[in-house]
Image (tube, coloured by chain):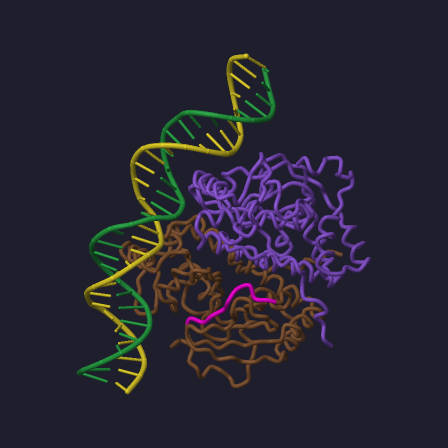
Chain colours: A purple, B brown, C green, D yellow
Amino acid sequence: MADRPMSAFSDEPTLDGYIAKLEKRSEISPETKVAFCSLRAQRIELASHQDFIREGDAVDRCSFVEEGLVSRYKTMRDGGRQILSFHLPGDMIDLHASLLLVADHGVRTHVPTSILTVAASDILALAADYPELARAFWFDTLVDAAIFREWTLNVGRRSARQRVAHLLMELAHRYNQIGEGDGRRFPLQLIQADIADATGLSAVHVNRSLQYMRGERLIRTQGRMVEIEDREGLARLAEFDDRYLHPEGPRQHPRID
Amino acid sequence: MADRPMSAFSDEPTLDGYIAKLEKRSEISPETKVAFCSLRAQRIELASHQDFIREGDAVDRCSFVEEGLVSRYKTMRDGGRQILSFHLPGDMIDLHASLLLVADHGVRTHVPTSILTVAASDILALAADYPELARAFWFDTLVDAAIFREWTLNVGRRSARQRVAHLLMELAHRYNQIGEGDGRRFPLQLIQADIADATGLSAVHVNRSLQYMRGERLIRTQGRMVEIEDREGLARLAEFDDRYLHPEGPRQHPRID
DNA sequence: GATAAGAATTAACTTGGGTTAGTGTGATTT
DNA sequence: AAATCACACTAACCCAAGTTAATTCTTATC
């Protein structure tokens, strides 16, 4: 958390992070921006490894990560956990709460995290009034789905080393997208048991995989920071292709009258 | 295919199947229905095990399954395939084509299949004019994402037997939703290698898993038909909970002015 | 009804990753 | 500076699932 000092938090909860993300993808008119930013948001501050939403909870608010790191996960009867996605600052989580009524998965933090929540009904009303936003929300949902597909491939068909390598590549890319690091260095705010939960492996085997990658000079770690030493090598190992992250934004000017 | 005779195909491609699906979830006004059904659709007839879309293809049309069965999949360099989802008659596939430009996965048939395609720009224009439809498309995308999440759990954390059992339960439910079978019997239009691709297993191990389930009197098979003998038992084995299929439709009357 | 092709099944053997039960190690707390 | 805690790391052993390859069984097709 050293990179983003607590002093950066304004007292008034603002949704600037998400707007910044939208603007990277397509132009947003000033009116839309004003309307979105005037949503009444509530800030929630959570400690590390805290449940924010539990599976089965009724949900009526959508949430954004302002600062920190959260994951969405499902659990098995035997306690096994599968992490489904990670959400970095500026990400909207639980956009689905706007249309679905019950959470089919949990959300929890991995570091001290600040979350902003907005009433789902406000999001829907806004989507009805500003087609630009409706499209942006839909696009967000589509990218979400694309990432889930890639994760299904990851845990379904890749070897342990590939799975861990792929996760590291994804995180490096996504931290880069939000302006942290250069696509090679990023703060790995996860313990090895978390990586295991995300990759469908045991913590012990995650450790073995990380050591293999260090031994092959693909990555280096110093404390919580990861540095990708050999980008091509790691990408080759992971069969990583960043297209599924859809950094380019939605199709433009789609209306043909 | 015996259940749905080829004669059921009208000569004019119609999108009735999808409309029927939407109407199960929420009321659709007659005008919206007319507007949707007047979309210019093209029908494509495909043989069994044919690629319809290949990974990396530029996509500018959205497609619906009229009759048959298709899957979306990703492939590995070594030829390994991971099926990401199945699509039954009435399902919209590649709704994401309306906003994303390149397919990040392939689509192929498993039996002779008839597909209807509509220009992505027409879909977007319609979504802009009929908020009802925009919401329906978004909801569809959310349910899609929910199914991908469940599949990630399936291949990431469940045992081989559980994975296969879970897939059978999902298919039984979905065929039931579209009025085929009673939730116990359904046509399994997949070879064991397909099940392997969907569950992240080898075909041999799928065979072992199926035999286990037959031995435990959980399922019975006759040719391509599967009958679930012990619904509770299979659900328990699979840890199946149908909520992720969201049969209930989207949140109603969400607008609060 | 012979032939061929496509699937399902079986068996023998291998292996990647899980499990258990530890031992470091560096940060906090007292 | 001892004690505690959380996490990283190791080693020994095990097993679920993969691999290969041969053998039925089914289904089309001629």
Magenta segment: does it hold A183? no
On screen, residue B236 above or below B120: above
Q: Which residue shows up at 69% across the image and 54% down it?
A: A121
**Residue A69 place in picture, x, y as percent:** 62, 42
Q: In terms of image quadrants, where is residue C30?
A: top right
Magenta segment: does it hold B108? yes
On screen, residue A257 above or below A26: below
- Total marks shown come to 0
The answer to whether residue A61 is visible is no
**Residue B163 place in picture, x, y as percent:** 40, 54
Q: Is residue B80 left or right of residue B93?
A: left
Question: Which image quarter is the N terminus of chain B in?
Answer: bottom left
Question: Which image quarter is the C terminus of chain B in?
Answer: bottom right
Q: Which residue shows up at 73% across the image and 46% down it?
A: A41
On screen, residue B12 above or below B237: below
The answer to whether residue A151 is visible is yes
Q: In terms of image quadrants, where is residue B28?
A: bottom right
- Residue toward you, A223 or B169: A223
- Residue toward you, A163 or B11: A163
Span shown in magenta: B102-110
